[in-house]
Amino acid sequence: MKLTKVLSSLRSGLWFIPLLYAVAGLIINVATTFTDRALDFELIPQTLIGGPDAALAILGTVAASMISLVATVLAITMVIVQLAMAQFSPRIVQTFLQDRPSQNAIGLFVATFVQAMLSMREVQVSDDDPVVPGLSVAVTFLLVVVDIVVLVIYVHHIGRSLRVSALIEFVGKDTRDLMDELYTERLDVDEPDDPHLVTASASGVLSLVDREALVDVATAAGGRIQLVPAIGQFVPAGAPLVRLEGMTVADVDLDKLHKAVDLTLERSLQQDVAYGLRMLVDMGTKAISESPHADPTTTVQVIDRVHDVLRQLARRRLPDGIECDDRGQVRVVIPSMDWAAFVRLGFDEMRTSGAGSLQVSRRLRAALEDLLDHVPDDRRAPLEEQLALLDEAVGDVKGAGWRPEAITSPDPLGIGVEAGEVQAEVPVARR
């Protein structure tokens, strides 16, 4: 118990891994110094490394740079911890303190600093018998190159770590690992062995589907593949991923099938148009949330983009999710969104959140009326439903000072004026 407590304390601190790296830097210096002395400092000639003055300048510069890098990494880590505490949860701090890439970056810079500082004491500036520890200087050069690579990787890692999905996955992974450690015994439950079902080997969001590869897999096995989740949907580990028709799991190339279905940390815009609308709606609803920083103009700008996306989508044929082989036989079926689903995604949440804002509700009305004039007849019903729901929502929350004509007047500009108040008219003098 005491050992577990000590190990947990060491693992949760930011200092232990860098301390190990410092010891490693000391060991490296002892080894390189011993080798230089054993070979009378002639392993690497001074013509390649430079004289004592150059060696001292290089080692001193490296040591100073490493201290600056350590300070920079610590400062970045502390800033990120503060941002995470403010934006997500104060309890997320422990996750960053246990972040291995940050600890490894700090540790490697410390090891390079130790190597450079200890190598400087071996340099002897003398006109008669100058001494330059060639191997020690060369190893310091090599460590600096590695440091540069690690710094780039660290910056990339920190940028990715600031994503909400990455932070959530950090905590989720730690929880799963602890669960595997503490709850090792499984229940004796008879799980039906379905030969027509392929489950997910790991959890993730379905972000990319290689349709051609799936068609090849289904054609080779002589059957049909039915994808269970839609693109953008989260799939837990062990959950149904693919249903097979006309073939069994033993008939298909599972390796190729899993490679064709990409489960990632979060949704992306590679094949997921709905995710673009989702991000726009998130920005729009956040801007009109109940807070002192409500900004309906930002929501109006979001509605502009949602309006534009749906207007472009209105006269395009939406994919039915059916993929065929060269002979026209259906081989792959992928769940897909219809027009009504896109309309609900674009307007439902902003309608309910923005009904109390005259500026937002009128811009929504303008967008819906324009789309009704633009879409084919078979796509009007979802828009008419949205317009009726908007009338109902505005009627429930309208303020005492609202004029009746203002409530039902669309505002395509989104600046708070009624239709007809902004006009283009040629003056009489110019007619």
Image (cartoon, grey):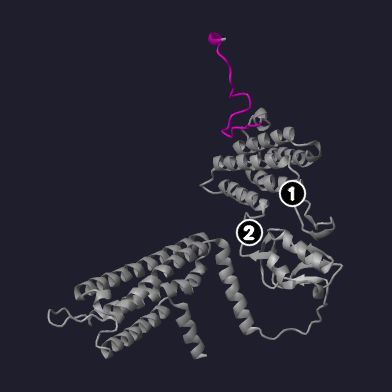
Q: Position of residue 201 (x, y in %)?
A: 69, 73
User: Closest to the observer: 92 or 158?
Assistant: 158
Quarter of the image holding residue 176? Answer: bottom right
Q: Is residue 426 magenta?
A: yes
Image position of 49 with respect to 76: above or below: below
User: Closest to the observer: 8 or 219?
Assistant: 219
Q: Amino acid at mark 1?
A: Ala
User: Which residue is located at x 45 percent, y 82 percent?
Assistant: 10
Crowd tier of the residue under label 2, counting other residues whose Cα lies within 10 Å: few below 14, some 14–19, many 20 or above: many
Q: Which mark is residue 27?
A: none
Quarter of the image holding residue 57? Answer: bottom left
User: Closest to the observer: 97 or 142?
Assistant: 142
Q: Which mark is residue 341?
A: 1
User: Which residue is located at x 46 percent, y 67 percent?
Assistant: 153
Q: Is residue 269 left or right of residue 295?
A: right
Which portion, as a residue range, is magenta? 410-430
Q: Is residue 137 left or right of residue 210?
A: left
Q: Please, what secondary structure does the residue beneath circle 2 have?
A: loop
User: Closest to the observer: 407 or 213?
Assistant: 213
Crowd tier of the residue under label 1, counting other residues whose Cα lies within 10 Å: few below 14, some 14–19, many 20 or above: few
Q: State which mark lies toward you, 2 or 1.
A: 2
> Main SS type for the magenta part?
loop
Q: Position of residue 169 (x, y in %)?
A: 59, 68
User: Does the CB distance between marks 2 and 1 fall below 8 Å?
Assistant: no
